[in-house]
Image (tube, rainbow, N blue to C red):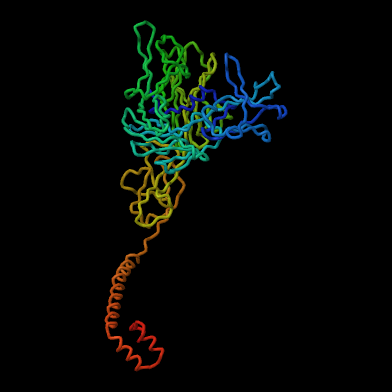
Amino acid sequence: MLSAGAECVFMGLFLYISGVGANSICALKGSSVDLHCSAQRPKSSRKWFTVRWEDNKKVQDQIFADGKRVNISEESNFTITINDLRESDKNTYCCSDVDDKRNKCQRGEIQLLVADLQVKVFPATGEKTVSLMCSSSCPLTESPVVYIWYKNTEFLYQDSSPWYQELISSEESVTYSCALKGYEHLRAPEVSVASLTSACFTVTYAKGRMCSNQQRPEDEPCSITYPREVQVHVQKTKVRGHFKLACNTSCPQTEAQTITWYKNRRLEQEPRSVLSSSPHSYSCAVEHLFSDEVCIQDQYCSRVNYVNRRICALQGSSVNISSEYSDPYYQQSKSKSWYKNRRSDMAAGEELIKSTDRIKFHGVMNSHILTIKKLNKNDSAEYIFRIRSNAGRWPAVPGVTLVVTDLRVKFSPSAEEVTEGQRVTLTCRTSCPLTDNMNYIWYLNNQPLNLTKTQSKYLVLDPVSSEHAGNYSCKVKMLQKSSLQKMLTVHRRRKWTQAAIRIVVLLLVVIPTSIFLWIRRKMTSIQSPRTETSFNLEEISPGQVYENISAQPIEEDDIL
């Protein structure tokens, strides 16, 4: 069965298969990368090569700079820069001296991986919700990485966690995308989620290349229906001691789905028949959703599974990371250990976890539990359980991804100053999606709000008034630590606004009426004979000046 609703992180398995290590560089498709030369000879004799295998021998092909996409700088320690990275640039590179025939490219090889950014959709614990992850096919070397999320092409927020902060329900008209800060022009193709049921969900991708099993043009959308559960079913065959394996899913399989098989965590063809005494473990996957590992009989086989592949936990809380394993009877176990792997620091490698006052281990039958108390952000990492036996240490497997988040208050609209009468939504925000059954407590000026219904992560003020102004914080029930306070300022509406409107309306009536009466009066005065007006003026003060004036139209105001 798919652990915790298939919330498995594919990245760990990819790293194991491809062998990503300290001499590897993972860069985003479409970006630029610098590879530094490790050769010790004079610069003039240095050359760059790609390395490939041919007939079980290494073959080196020299790289030539074109001055555009590929540049080699002698001034910068013979660094090679590759711009606009493509899938074809994925290769092993080395810098060596042309006349060094014996040690040519034997040391300092660099494996370059080209990451394709994608929004991956995983079933969540709720029956009709899913979670989103901004995923790259390998952990990017550049750090720290900041993820930017978009909703309907509009900027939403940025955070250090690759997981989208909310659980998503069926919203076919809503699209989601992500990018990395500094590479906003290299966004992942948009996705939308629809037809969410207890068994399946459908994801529509804006780019056809996201559906590997469908022959679609690059810019045409495509859809895949994913199962919520994937499991390997072991069934007997007619031949004694032989078993057949089937990859069962919670919804009908379609041609759009790509099913892959793994033996001992390595890519394998679909197994046709397996002996009951087989020492191998098997698993299958539908796209990026993996089943648990199974053995035909646990007594012959080594396997490790986890109850939850992804855990989102709050700072200050405690968490149990549980593993289930089988231990072959013929291999004597020497130790059972947990390891911590911080993907943000690939060079640091894995760190053995030791028991402390805060960290404890518990073993019951074929289960082993790691408990971490008083979580802090440095606990965010991948946790891997391993068994060391007389046959050696078990190979690395994808572990449990733990994300530790704090609480933050977010306003919508985002402005911290609003006006009375608006609708304001407050969100108790996290860096990863918590389960839906969390109970929240809201505080205003350090005093708990007495709300009539069960408090959720949302607090709606509609309409907001001056009484709602103050410092808001939130916390999850049963935990002492609350979020930092955030101030909401509410401006009063001016009371004279309505009176001012009445005055303006009155003036709009009075002024046109006055103008009309004034014009009417004027027209009445003009109707008197002009000769009479001229005669009267001459009688008051005869002269040339008034004669000139009398020849022009006369207004009543000029006479008065």
Q: Quadrant of residue 463?
A: bottom left
Percent of width and height locating residue 443 = 40, 49
Percent of width and height locating residue 373 = 48, 34
- Residue found at the very far right of the displayed protein: 42
Between residue 157 and residue 39, name the one nearer to us.
39
- Residue depicted at 36% across the width and 27% down the height: 226
Between residue 278 and residue 185, name the one nearer to us.
185
| Quarter of the image with the C terminus in it | bottom left
Q: Is residue 68 rendered to the left or right of residue 234? A: right
| Quarter of the image with the N terminus in it | top left
Percent of width and height locating residue 109 = 62, 24
Percent of width and height locating residue 105 = 65, 22
Q: Is residue 559 rendered to the left or right of residue 28? A: left
- Residue found at the very far top of the displayed protein: 240
Between residue 425 and residue 481, name the one nearer to us.
425
- Residue depicted at 43% across the width and 35% down the height: 189
Residue 551 shows in this picture: yes
Residue 343 shows in this picture: no
Q: Is the residue 390 above or below the residue 435 in the image?
A: above
